[in-house]
Image (cartoon, rainbow, N blue to C red):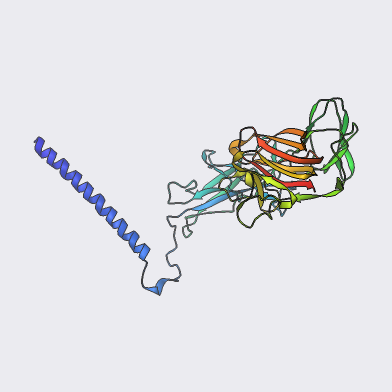
């Protein structure tokens, strides 16, 4: 009896193996047939006659953008945001999936009535919830949206929505911050259309940080030899240590106009080391790159404020720009390159010859740049590094040459 059982077991295993081999052979044959194609051209462009769901998937997408002008509408001044978390819930409120926005700003949720791996598989009402970063706001107050999906037997995936979720604009809280030197006092005024909106007294040897309203377009600091003005951007501003006599406000900087280096004219390729002499400056360990050249590069996308390219510190190592003749260092947009390095600390050091001029630490985010504006009237070398050696992104570097 034992021998018979063993024989039956072996036979079953042989048959199962043979069945698997036959299935593999048939699958290989069908695949080869598809690769070879059909020699008959009669149906090369035939209209589809049997409409019904396929085994494919479609992306049902939520779009998130940096709302530069804060109006809640995706317009020409705005830019897609990468790395923003969007969650999907069913009509009972059960969590289904999380997706992060790609470099084009889309959080994609696969939809199919036939694929078990799809996030959306049946008709119903779904909630798309954009996770608003701390200190930010959804400018259109539409971070949570309900979308109804219905069965559509003739469609590609068997489902169709009443519409896609509307674009969600995010705006960071604007602040202006810096540090006062020992023995100096000044007044910081927040301006809007030429009028003073509010004023703050700045005491000696004190750090300051003030929120800035949406109508503000400029900050002015007066007294204590610290007089200067800064046109505000859509991003937080960091002035660093305010050094008396090191700065000069106005349209001219040491007799030269300010120029903006956006890194779009370094190369026509997606990636290139910045050559010495570009824009009249020598560069060390800085690369120019298209914003979407590297996959899942949130900071490279979000730190790009103009054109299509940014610069970054190669391999996270210290980088420099310099020139033998003194030049003015007005400002630069600084961003953490990756969401995994959120909160990285940047160190920016400036020299005039061998004499240190400024040394500032700036907390970086991969979601939006910090507008670092030391407004130094004369330097010959600027060194950029990060505390934990992650890459740092630069855009719109403003110099007076």
The reply, left or right, for residue 162 in relation to residue 51 is right
Q: Position of residue 212 (x, y in %)?
A: 79, 37
Residue extending furthest toward the bottom: 42
The reply, left or right, for residue 346 in relation to residue 179 is left
**Residue name at image x 28 percent, y 57 percent:** 26
Between 284 and 3, which is closer to the camera in this rendering? 284
Between 282 and 386, which is closer to the camera in this rendering? 282
Observer able to see residue 300: yes
Eyeballing the image, is 62 above or below 39? above
Observer able to see residue 81: no
Eyeballing the image, is 73 above or below 379? below
Q: Residue 329 falls in which quadrant of the image?
A: top right
Q: Position of residue 253 (x, y in %)?
A: 85, 45
Q: Position of residue 202 (x, y in %)?
A: 85, 29
Between 126 and 283, which is closer to the camera in this rendering? 283
**Residue name at image x 81 percent, y 26 percent:** 206
**Residue name at image x 61 percent, y 33 percent:** 388
Q: Residue 126 falls in which quadrant of the image?
A: top right
Q: Position of residue 121 (x, y in %)?
A: 47, 48
The reply, left or right, for residue 22 in relation to residue 256 is left
Quadrant (top left, top right, bottom left, bottom right) of the N terminus: top left
């Amino acid at each position: 009896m034992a021998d018979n059982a063993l024989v039956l077991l072996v036979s079953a295993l042989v048959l199962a193996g043979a069945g698997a081999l036959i299935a593999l052979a048939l699958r290989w044959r069908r695949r080869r047939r598809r690769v070879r194609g059909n020699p008959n051209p009669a149906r090369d462009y035939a209209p589809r006659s049997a409409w019904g769901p396929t085994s494919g998937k479609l992306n049902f997408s939520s779009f998130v953008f940096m709302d530069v002008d804060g109006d809640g509408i995706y317009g020409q001044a705005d830019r897609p945001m990468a790395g923003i978390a969007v969650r999907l819930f069913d009509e009972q409120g059960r969590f289904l999936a999380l997706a992060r926005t790609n470099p084009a700003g889309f959080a994609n949720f696969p939809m199919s009535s036939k694929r078990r791996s799809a996030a959306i598989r049946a008709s119903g009402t779904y909630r798309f919830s954009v996770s608003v970063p701390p200190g930010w706001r959804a400018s259109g107050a539409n971070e949570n949206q309900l979308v109804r999906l219905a069965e559509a037997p003739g469609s590609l995936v068997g489902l169709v929505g009443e519409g896609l979720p509307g674009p969600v604009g995010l705006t960071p809280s604007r602040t202006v911050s810096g540090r006062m030197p020992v023995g100096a006092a000044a007044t910081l005024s927040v301006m809007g259309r030429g009028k003073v909106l509010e004023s703050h007294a700045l005491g000696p040897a004190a750090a300051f940080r003030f929120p800035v309203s949406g109508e503000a377009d400029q900050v002015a600091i007066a007294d204590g030899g610290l007089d200067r003005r800064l046109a505000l951007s859509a991003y937080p501003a960091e002035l660093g240590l305010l050094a008396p006599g090191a700065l000069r406000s106005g349209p001219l900087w040491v007799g030269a106009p300010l120029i903006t280096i956006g890194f779009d004219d370094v190369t026509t390729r997606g990636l290139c080391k910045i050559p010495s002499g570009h824009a009249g400056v020598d560069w060390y360990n800085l690369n120019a790159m298209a914003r979407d050249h590297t996959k899942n590069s949130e900071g490279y996308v979000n730190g790009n404020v103009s054109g299509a390219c940014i610069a970054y510190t190669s391999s996270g190592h210290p980088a420099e720009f310099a020139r033998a003749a003194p030049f003015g260092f007005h400002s630069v947009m600084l961003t953490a390159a990756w969401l995994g390095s959120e909160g990285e600390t940047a160190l920016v050091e400036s020299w005039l010859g061998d004499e240190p001029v400024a040394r500032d630490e700036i907390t970086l985010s991969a979601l939006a740049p910090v507008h670092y504006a030391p407004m130094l009237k004369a330097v010959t070398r600027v060194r950029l590094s990060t505390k934990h050696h992650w890459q740092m992104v630069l855009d719109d570097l403003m110099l007076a040459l």
